[in-house]
Amino acid sequence: MVLNYLSEYKKKTKRSAKLFTKSKKLHINGVSHNIRFFEPYPFVVKKSSGKNLIDVDDNKYTDYWMGHWSLILGHGPKNVKESLKKQIEKSWMYGTVNEQTILLSELISKAVPVAEKIRYVTSGTEATMYAIRLARSVTGKKIIAKIDGGWHGYTSDLLKSVNWPFSESESSGVVNEEKIISIPYNNLEKSISILKKHAKNLAGVIIEPVLGGGGCIPATPEYLKGIQEFIHKNKSLFILDEIVTGFRFRFGCLYPTMKLNPDIVTLGKIVGGGMAIGVICGKKEIMKFADTTGKKKSERSYIGGGTFSANPASMTAGFATLNELKTKKSAYTKINNLGEFTRKELSKSFDGKVAITGKGSLFMTHFLNNGITEIRNATDAAKCDNLQLAKYHFKMTAHDGIFFLPGKLGAISNMHTKADIKKMITASENI
Ligand SMILES: Cc1ncc(COP(=O)(O)O)c(C=O)c1O
């Protein structure tokens, strides 16, 4: 870490430092999600608005982390806030069937063809956990394939091959790891040869159409089509994890643009409008396995829900967000164009020694290293100079009032302007 940025950061975040010392006494690593910690300590946020985070020392940051990329309309957009206020007046937790859920599901099911039936949970982690349980129930098989570098949340089953070199266990306490196999992204030949070895007991594959945590890398349509073809021929299930990509690039999912035909799609983040959510969407013929009426325990897949599932606050925020996106489709044109501009301009920075990956309003900088010239998968991304990336992001936080979670991809919201992007690019030229 460049020393003068470290002292600049410490000087302006004194109250954060004090509070974080307290937080460390109370919480593991001082945080409630491992990725939220960064050296020397993360600033403590007191409020957010539009494109900005404001910390307890009154520093303002233009935010590109945007609530784990969930806030496509920015922090506290007016219509979502108004809808939530009205809902809070009525109450925020019923624990019963409510109309808000039906309203949100009507929007999702019209926009996402596979969502013939929907089940809500309160995180993406739960959604992927249930999606693979369902796949195992439907097929009667046990093995799930995932991608090297694929992140689907902390669910024990999928906590495998997340971090390069992908061969080490990600955590103690995880069992039955042999039931999860891992395939290399965008390498169809190698992936198929691995899948073939497990074909007999393969329940399904789970893939992000844009590898998020693994480096913001779009899958090639040929790769996804090839995997889907093998999976369907094998009578296994094709699960797309669109928790990041759903409603991010267009009103709906990414998969129809690639003419894919998934059996199950998971959603989260944007569709909760900044409130806790996870969604399992599936075709009727798949979701009927989760129907508990008149089925023996051995036949049914017991999935989802939970105390806070489909709570009226999440449903209301999700509906207000999707409704705004539906009526203002120009928002997608705006943020997708800003993303394209960002990737083009950022790639000229750093004397061309970077690759900028992403799609639409998502982008990530990779400092090319170790002979890597192109980023096709999580291995390429991991071999880049990620220390340099963390330094670059920290410099912008400390010096320029621009926040990326160090090392993570950036998300542009409808609150960002071209002037914000230009400021970020200028800040990138001066590291
Ligand atoms: C693709 C993907 N799937 C699942 C998850 C887990 O979602 P959550 O953090 O809501 O549990 C994430 C979180 O970042 C994700 O990026």
Image (tube, grey):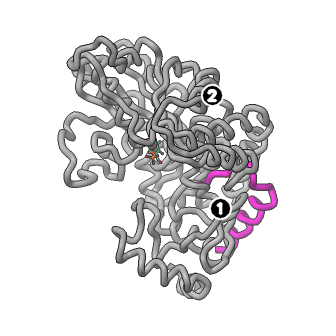
For residue 411, side relative to residue 387 (left or right): right
Q: Secondary structure at mark 1?
A: strand
Question: Could you say which is closer to the camera, residue 57 or residue 214?
Answer: 57
**Which amino acid lies under the numbered mark 2 shown in the image of this protein?**
Leu
Residue at image position (61%, 50%) is 363
**Which amino acid lies under the numbered mark 1 shown in the image of this protein?**
Asp
Residue at image position (60%, 70%) is 46
Q: Secondary structure at mark 2?
A: helix
Is 183 drawn above or below residue 283 in the view shown? below
Place of residue 219 in the rendered image (x, y in percent of width and height, measured from the top left): 52, 35
Question: Mark 2: few, some, or many residues within 10 Å (few <14, many ≥20)?
Answer: some
State whether residue 102 appears in this view.
yes
For the record, the magenta segment spans: 410-431
Is 39 drawn above or below residue 296 in the view shown? below
Is tag 2's residue or tag 1's residue first in the polypeptide sequence? 1
Q: Please identify the quarter of the rendering in which residue 87 is found.
A: top right
For residue 18, side relative to residue 253 (left or right): left
How many marks can you see?
2
Place of residue 286 in the rendered image (x, y in percent of width and height, measured from the top left): 40, 16
Residue at image position (36%, 73%) is 26
Instruction: Please give the label number shown on residue 300.
Output: none
Place of residue 302 in the rendered image (x, y in percent of width and height, measured from the top left): 30, 26
Of badges 2 and 1, nearer the viewer stands 2
For residue 135, side relative to residue 66 (left or right): left
Q: Please identify the quarter of the rendering in which residue 421 is found.
A: bottom right
Is 414 drawn above or below residue 241 in the view shown? below
Is 137 drawn above or below residue 155 in the view shown? above
For residue 67, side relative to residue 18 (left or right): right
Residue at image position (66%, 63%) is 48
Instruction: Please give the label number shown on residue 103.
Output: 2
Residue ID for mark 1? 63
